[in-house]
Amino acid sequence: MGDIILTGDRPTGRLHLGHYVGSLSQRVELQNSGKYDEIYIEIADSQATTDNFGNIQKIKDNVLEVALDYLSCGIDPKKTTIFLQSQVPELSDLTFYYMNLVTLARLERNPTVKQEIIYRGFNNTIPVGFLTYPISQAADITAFNANIVPVGEDQLPMIEQTREIVRSFNRLYGKTLVEPKAVLPQNKICQRLPGTDGQTKMSKSIGNCIYLADSPEEVQRKIMSMYTDPNHLHVSDPGETEGNPVFIYLEAFSKPKHFLEYFKNKETGELEYKNLDELKAHYQRGGLGDVKVKKFLNYVIQDTLQPIRELRHKYEKNIPEVYRILFEGSERARKVASETLAKVKKAIGLDYRSDIELINSQCEKYGSITFQETKN
Ligand code: ATP
Ligand code: MG
């Protein structure tokens, strides 16, 4: 079997720059490389209910937003199956069987889930569904026999959990499931992009995001009010670039062409800064103001988002087409997931219909007439 990719996002908000560098841009590259047999992208609406069960409308609205974000970033439904988790009920069945292979203590040790519980203020009211969502992610990945899962760093504990489930399952019931591998973005900074407020992760739930669908004005406003080095009070002060989100974003998004376009002196043709290292060095020794760096960052981000915005506007004019893509993708996904579920049930020993031996041995035990297979 060739390489199969599965990734996904929770429809709990529009996608942001963290998603873009952490996962989405990689997905588009992998898709266009033509090296993969199958690519699945899941909109994890069922998983989103685990911490939004009182606000289903939010999930429904964001299903469309996330789909639009995918398409506008270049996910091509002819090459990639985009599907809705809730429309593939086989995934819940798989989750149920995998639950037996994981202990409560193991779930409680998951560092990402621990952090999310704090953010959500669950304290002693953690919904069981929320605590167990890493198991449902194992179902999502294994249902499609995915061996490659491109994700941001926060997802590593989920992939590890999946690998453990696969190993336990295969040991107990015979080799059935494929063990996946997480693929992180090569640029370390992109593995966990910080928020505009300087917090360690840009996240929908924290609300420190620049969204792919933000208007140019909104993007500019957010960038100009970004957190920087709090000790860099005057332009002449030496500044810190380490841990400074403005410089981190430049590292994640700026390309040589941005320096060429933005810092070229129109008369002399000279470049004020040739690259990020030069810009950083100036900031570190003092004499470079935050406003100037932020204006450059705004230029870089607008340039990155412009083509995405244009494609989004095109799809926004044909929303039924977007739903059609989701429904067709979900149907395709369902076929594959039901094949895996059948394999899993057979491996466990729960496929009564095709287990003629079992039925006949029971017939013998009770002195019954034997089973005649009925054709329908
Ligand atoms: P939520 O707060 O609702 O959990 P989220 O912003 O964490 O939302 P998810 O839908 O949970 O987004 O994550 C989808 C994918 O995007 C995952 O692979 C995750 O690792 C990646 N990702 C999310 N935020 C970032 C980030 N700030 N930097 C890099 N990757 C990220
Ligand atoms: Mg998350």
Image (cartoon, rainbow, N blue to C red):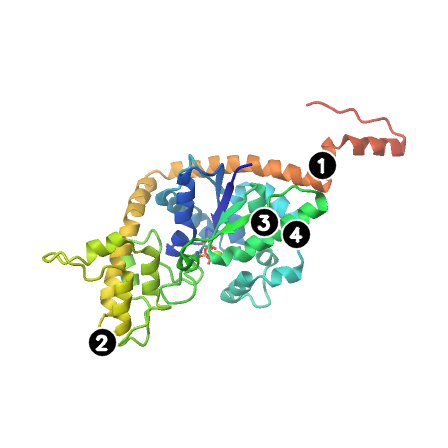
Q: Which three-letter amino acid code belongs to the residue tagged 2?
A: Ser
Q: Which three-letter amino acid code belongs to the residue tagged 1?
A: Asp
Q: Secondary structure at mark 4?
A: helix
The residue positioned farthest toward the top in the image shown: 375
Q: Secondary structure at mark 3?
A: helix
Q: Position of residue 11 (x, y in %)?
A: 46, 51
Mark 3 or 4, nearer chain start: 4
Image side of residue 30 versus residue 116, left or right:
left
Mark 2 or 1, nearer chain start: 2
Q: Position of residue 248 (x, y in %)?
A: 35, 62
Identify the mark at residue 138; answer none if there is no mark: 3
Which is more foreground, mark 3 or mark 4? 3
Tell me where residue 372 sits by quadrant.
top right
Q: Position of residue 50 (x, y in %)?
A: 55, 55
Which quarter is ligand 1 in?
Answer: bottom left
Say few, some or many: other residues with alpha carbon within 10 Å of mark 2 (under 14 / 14 to 19 / 20 or more): few
Q: Secondary structure at mark 2?
A: loop
Q: Residue at x 43, y 51 (%)?
A: 23
Quarter of the image with the C terminus is top right
Say few, some or many: other residues with alpha carbon within 10 Å of mark 1 (under 14 / 14 to 19 / 20 or more): some
Q: Can residue 15 be seen by looking at this rendering?
A: no
Real-space CA distance between mark 2 and mark 4, rounded to the nearest whole angstrom: 59 Å
Quarter of the image with the N terminus is top right
Dots 2, 1 in contact, CB < 8 A: no
- According to the image, label 1 marks what residue? 351
Image side of residue 11 versus residue 363, left or right:
left
Dots 2, 4 in contact, CB < 8 A: no
Identify the mark at residue 299; answer none if there is no mark: none
Mark 2 or 3, nearer chain start: 3
- According to the image, label 4 marks what residue? 99
Say few, some or many: other residues with alpha carbon within 10 Å of mark 4 (under 14 / 14 to 19 / 20 or more): some
Report the number of discs. Answer: 4
